């Protein structure tokens, strides 16, 4: 029997790799001879690099980058898959909110310069395709810091080259964009950005208004940031001929979505779709007898581009039954999408207990799921 194990991470508990391993142990206890294909998944957020490297047998690379507040000597990790031709990057490795203490969070000062440094290192490693997850940012710089690391020059109203590490508070000072010295390899690189939000760049639903406060922005800062992003969009349209204002997802990661479109020719897409294609999920499911996926919380939001539903969609196309094992579920979850749903938390397990020993309970639930699946198969 062939079983594909393709779960997402259980946030703040287990990585996707650890979830897949725990499920596999439960399967083996019931079916020692089963052929198990471990394919940890992600939706472009935290854990994407680890999941995709593990799922494809890729490798990790490490690079020293500038952190979100301009500090140096921060080590960031990215992945190489497809024999090194594709890089997998998480922007949060260089400019993530958890990298800054709460009292120091200020999107007028934070920069994505380190993200551009990771991109450059990936190019140096030979990657000509990139997948960039942009969740969890501490920045609202419109991607200009990242652009500077790629060789793009920003000039102020006095005709002077602006210093590297531009942040959200510098956007209104930009008078001209010069892409002459942008690394030529960028033009030949296919960049896909995993983006599951549709916020525009500016306005009441834009990057500053919606996400600025959680990054430390006061109402006054939000106003300055929104004005800065609007100014930047005008300069981009005038100098580069690209209108990024109303592109769905342009406001993601403090406008990094817009910046990667304008400065690197990137395309935005749903994270789960990008990851599924990169790990060859559909091909791996074809011919399988069962697919098991999972996620920490199974609720109505699961249908909005989360990994478990993406796996269920692929299994449905292949005509293969799919089981979901979640940490906890809510009544409004799309249970109908799966042959069965199991949860760690139940009558016999409290939330506290599930958090203390998730891997052990996950293995137990996988064992129960396989036993029930085999019983139904015999009876059917």
Image: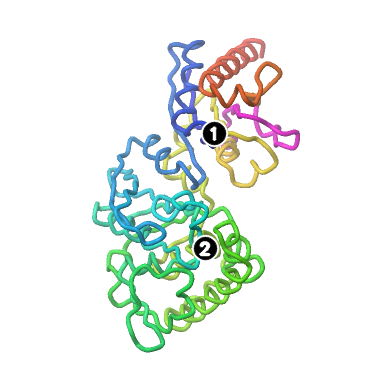
Q: Mark 2 or 1 closer to N-term?
A: 1
Q: In the shown orientation, is residue 379 left or right of residue 143?
A: right
Dot 2 falls on a residue whose secondary structure is helix
Q: Residue 103's x, y, as percent? A: 52, 55
Q: Is residue 61 above or below residue 256?
A: above
Query: Is 258 a magenta residue?
Result: no
Q: Is residue 378 above or below residue 139?
A: above
Q: Residue 58's x, y, as percent? A: 32, 39
Instruction: Tell which of 74 and 207 is nearer to you.
Output: 74
Residue at 40% from the left image edge and 50% from the top image edge: 93
Query: Is 327 a magenta residue?
Result: yes
In the rendered structure, are the residues bearing label 2 and label 1 in contact, judged by CB atoms less than 8 Å apart? Answer: no
Which of the 4 quarters of the picture holds residue 344? top right
Q: Is residue 170 above or below residue 69?
A: below
Name, please, the residue furthest toward the right: 331
Residue at 50% from the left image edge and 64% from the top image edge: 107
Instruction: Tell which of 351 and 321 is nearer to you.
Output: 351
Crowd around label 1: few <14 · some 14–19 · many ≥20 (10 Å) = some
Crowd around label 2: few <14 · some 14–19 · many ≥20 (10 Å) = many
Residue at 66% from the left image edge and 10% from the top image edge: 379
- Cα distance between the residues tagged 2 and 1: 26 Å
Instruction: Name the residue that disc number 2 marks.
Output: 254
Coloring applied to the structure: rainbow
Which of the 4 quarters of the picture holds residue 373? top right
Q: Quadrant of the C terminus?
A: top right
The residue segment tinted magenta is 316-339
Instruction: Name the residue that disc number 1 marks.
Output: 10
Q: Residue 136's x, y, as percent? A: 51, 52
């Amino acid at each position: 029997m062939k079983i594909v194990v393709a779960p997402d991470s259980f946030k703040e508990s287990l990585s996707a790799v650890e979830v897949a391993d725990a499920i596999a142990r439960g399967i083996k206890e019931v079916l020692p001879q089963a052929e198990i294909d471990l394919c940890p998944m992600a939706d472009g957020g935290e854990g994407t690099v680890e999941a995709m490297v593990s799922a494809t047998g890729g490798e990790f690379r490490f690079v020293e980058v500038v952190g979100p507040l301009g500090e140096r000597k921060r080590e960031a990790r990215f992945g190489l898959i497809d024999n090194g031709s594709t890089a997998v990057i998480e922007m949060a490795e260089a400019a993530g909110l958890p990298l800054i203490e709460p009292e120091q969070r200020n999107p007028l000062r934070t920069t994505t310069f380190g993200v551009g440094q990771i991109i450059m290192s990936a190019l140096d490693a030979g990657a000509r395709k990139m997948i960039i997850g942009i969740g969890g940012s501490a920045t609202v710089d419109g991607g200009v810091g990242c652009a500077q690391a790629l060789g793009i020059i920003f000039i102020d109203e006095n005709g002077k080259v602006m210093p590297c590490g531009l942040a959200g508070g510098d956007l209104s000072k930009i008078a001209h964009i010069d892409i002459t010295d942008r690394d030529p390899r960028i033009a030949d690189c296919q960049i896909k950005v995993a983006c599951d939000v549709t916020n525009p760049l500016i306005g009441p639903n834009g990057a500053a208004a919606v996400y600025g406060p959680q990054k430390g922005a006061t109402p006054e800062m939000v106003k300055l940031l929104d004005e800065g992003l609007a100014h930047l969009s005008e300069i981009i349209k005038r100098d580069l001929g690209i209108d990024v204002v109303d592109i769905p997802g342009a406001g993601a990661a403090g406008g990094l979505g817009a910046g990667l479109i304008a400065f690197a020719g990137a395309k935005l897409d749903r994270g789960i779709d990008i990851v599924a294609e990169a790990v060859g999920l559909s091909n791996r499911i074809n011919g399988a007898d069962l697919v098991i996926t999972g996620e920490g919380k199974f609720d109505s939001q699961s249908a909005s581009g989360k990994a478990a539903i993406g796996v269920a969609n692929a299994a449905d196309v292949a005509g293969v039954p799919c089981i979901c094992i979640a940490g906890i579920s809510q009544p409004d979850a799309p249970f109908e999408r799966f042959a069965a749903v199991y949860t760690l938390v139940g009558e016999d397990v409290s939330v506290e207990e599930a958090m203390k020993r998730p891997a052990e309970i996950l293995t137990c639930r996988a064992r129960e799921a396989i036993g029930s699946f085999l019983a139904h198969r015999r009876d059917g």
